[in-house]
Amino acid sequence: MPRLWISDGPAVGRAALGLILLAGGSCLGGCALRDRAQNRDSSAVVRIGDRNFSMADLNRYFDSRLNEFRDSVDADVVKSALLDAFVDEQLLLGKAEQLKIEPDAQALQSMREKLAIRQGEGAAAGGQKLDGLLEQSLAEDLKVQGYLTDHLFHGIAVTMEECEAYYKDHLSDFISNDVVRVREILVEDEAKAQRIQALLKTGRNKNFSELARIHSKAPTAADGGDLGTFQRGDLPEEFEKAIFSLPPGGVSKIVRSQYGYHTFYVEEKVLAHQQKFYEVADQIQEKLLLERQRAALDQELASLASRTTIRVDRGRLDFKYAGTRFASSGGKSQ
């Protein structure tokens, strides 16, 4: 039977740990807690097996992930999800260490260097060592990644035959919108925009790219006004009306915006069409592979949780736990 419970309150749903790990998220200061977690019963907020973690340990973990949510009105919900993710990452780390998985030395050094550059300290380049706890965090992250890649996900694959079958069953998901490649001339006043239009219409200068380099004030001027490619829905409505009605080689009427007066040129246009299998095969394979990896991860986490005692002392949390993963006081997981 599962042995997971939380004291004093309603339950929380599992955080999407698969999204965090599969997207390459790292512990970076949240996972390297084993040394600090021993003999801390008096201040323990979370107990996972024989390891105890304080609120300070959790805050260190949260701080590496909460920058964009710092002032969020949903901070309690976000922290609740991160608490679930913390528990799941610790379960996976325990499994990796049980299997005696060691971090790849080359990958560890690469992570050290990237982190040093990000911090602007040049620690790796200068031969200085990172903080011991942070160094351990990097190693533990690689242990978990090694367990997922070399053990849990080993052998999970998707064949081209399976991809093609998925494609045939979901044809409506693979219809491409109209796509255009656009150039632009942006000027400050309407009179100048009209003079440029006149040059284009009379043929005295049909080279739109040259006119853009000479007259446009947009950042794309040096590239002949090349804005790149867009599909319907990518651009403001007033721009789309002017652009998508044009044939290849067509020049738009003047369009006014807060930035000035725009003239657009459609260099290429591909109409909406049913995408061929070869166009989307890689996309389908990636989607199906990720789904299978997530399913394997969910199953493994459920198995690990069922064999591990996990306690969360809600009274010691500095936020309101808002999920549904754990049963109420003294109960067991659903």
Image (spheres, rainbow, N blue to C red):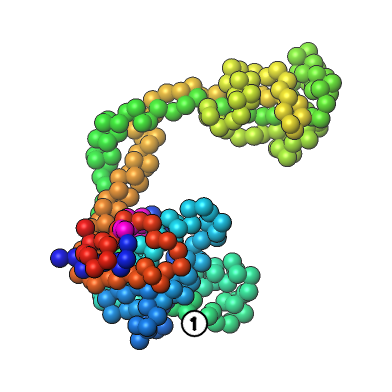
Considering every residue shown, the one lying at the far top of the view is 202
Q: Position of residue 233 (x, y in %)?
A: 53, 29
Front-lying residue, 71 or 191: 71
Which amino acid does the dot numbered 1 rest on? Answer: Gly
* Residue 14, magenta (yes or no): yes
Q: Is residue 146 visible?
A: no
* Residue 247, magenta (yes or no): no
| SS of the residue under disc 1 | helix
65 up-or-down from 180: above or below: below
Q: Position of residue 131 (x, y in %)?
A: 53, 80
The residue indicated by pointer 1 is 132
Q: Position of residue 6 (x, y in %)?
A: 30, 66
Q: Residues within 10 Å of mark 1 (few under 14, many from 20)?
A: few
The answer to which image quadrant residue 250 occupies is top right
Residue at x 24%, y 39% (from the top left corner): 161
Q: Provide the major secondary structure of the magenta segment.
A: loop
Q: Which residues are magenta?
A: 10-18
